[in-house]
Amino acid sequence: MNNRRRLVIALGASALAAPFPSFAQQPGKVWRIGVLETTSMALNAANFNMFRKGLLELGYAEGKNLVIDYRSAEGSVARFPELAAELVRLKVDLIVTRGTPALLAASNAAGTIPIVMAAIGEVPGQGIVASLAHPGGNVTGLSAFVTELTGKRLEILRKLIGKATRVAYLVDMSNPISLGQWKEAQAAAKSLRIQARLLDVRKPEDLGHAFDDAIKQRANGLVVGIDSLMQTNRQTIAELATKHRLPAIYASREFVDGGGLISYGVSYPDLYYRAAGHVDKIFKGKKPGDIPVEQPTKYELVINGNAAKALGIKIPNSILVRTDKVID
């Protein structure tokens, strides 16, 4: 039985099992939130600090009425089930996840514990939730629409480097979300009359070989997918792109802050900030399955000026006028 099938069963079972915990009207309670993340707290600081900010504005303060148990898989998807089980043993009131593998693990372990997706790449209809408006079960949160933006990133990269004929796509295909990203990249490449070559990397030590392959394939540019492996190793990826003088576009600003050239995608800090609102609603007694999954409202195009100079790239005005932030 595959992961998605297990998740559908888990969600269905949780909806029919014991009633959801009743959180309403519990004065003096100290809330316990378990966090299941791809990267360390340090690497995730820009996002998680906004989650904390949102919670604080809603009256939840660590050291007073809130405890946060943060667990990171450090880029290893295989660790998620163990970490999810640990959070359940800690008797957390709610679990916050980022990404499909973390959600799968949390759902399989949580029983009726509510789950809030701080950011999920897959859209409803693929086994994650029943629908945006009525997610059902014990899961709600925010969608990052990762797959739908893949083609747009390829278009931006094409404008950035001019006459591109070959583009490499770097991703970990063992992640459930990656196939959709790759199919979207292929479709966009076909419409732009560009050859797209897949670089399937499943271990950090294979990243260097992947870049060597991209150069051998005479790739003009690189599109980096968003998954656990890429997130955890974003600094290494940015450095390898600069070393091989390969212009690369990323799915989140985190890569550009780490030295990458350009990113286009949703604002993850904004998603995390809004996730605090979902937590608050659940703590006040609302069932997660009755809280709609929200869509992104803030997108950002970010450029690293120093990376552009290092690669000898002059950013076209057509891109500059749309840029939200240039990092020098």
Image: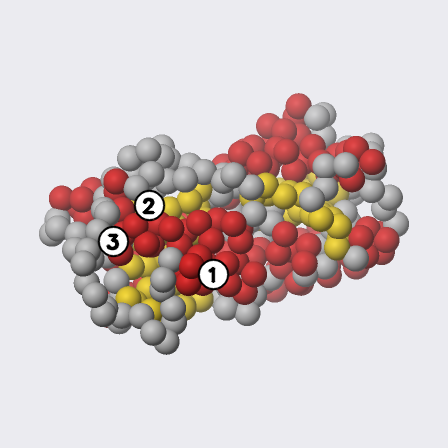
Residue at 70% across / 26% down in the picture? 192
180 left or right of 139? right
Residue that carries the numbered disc 2 in the rendered image: 140
Name which residue type carries label 2.
Answer: Thr
Residue 30 bears which disc, if any? none
Q: Nearer the viewer, mark 2 or mark 1?
A: 1
Residue 284 bears which disc, if any? 3
Of mark 2 and mark 1, the one earlier in the sequence is: 1
Neighbor class of circle 1 (other Cα within 10 Å; few <14, some 14-19, many 20+) is some
Q: Tell me the CA gap for discs 2 and 1.
A: 20 Å
The answer to whether the residue labelled 3 contacts the one labelled 1, judged by CB atoms less than 8 Å apart, is: no
Residue at 23% across / 68% down in the picture? 29
The answer to whether the residue labelled 2 contacts the one labelled 1, judged by CB atoms less than 8 Å apart, is: no
- In this rendered view, identify the residue nearer to me: 183 or 142: 142
Residue at 65% across / 26% down in the picture? 190
Neighbor class of circle 2 (other Cα within 10 Å; few <14, some 14-19, many 20+) is many
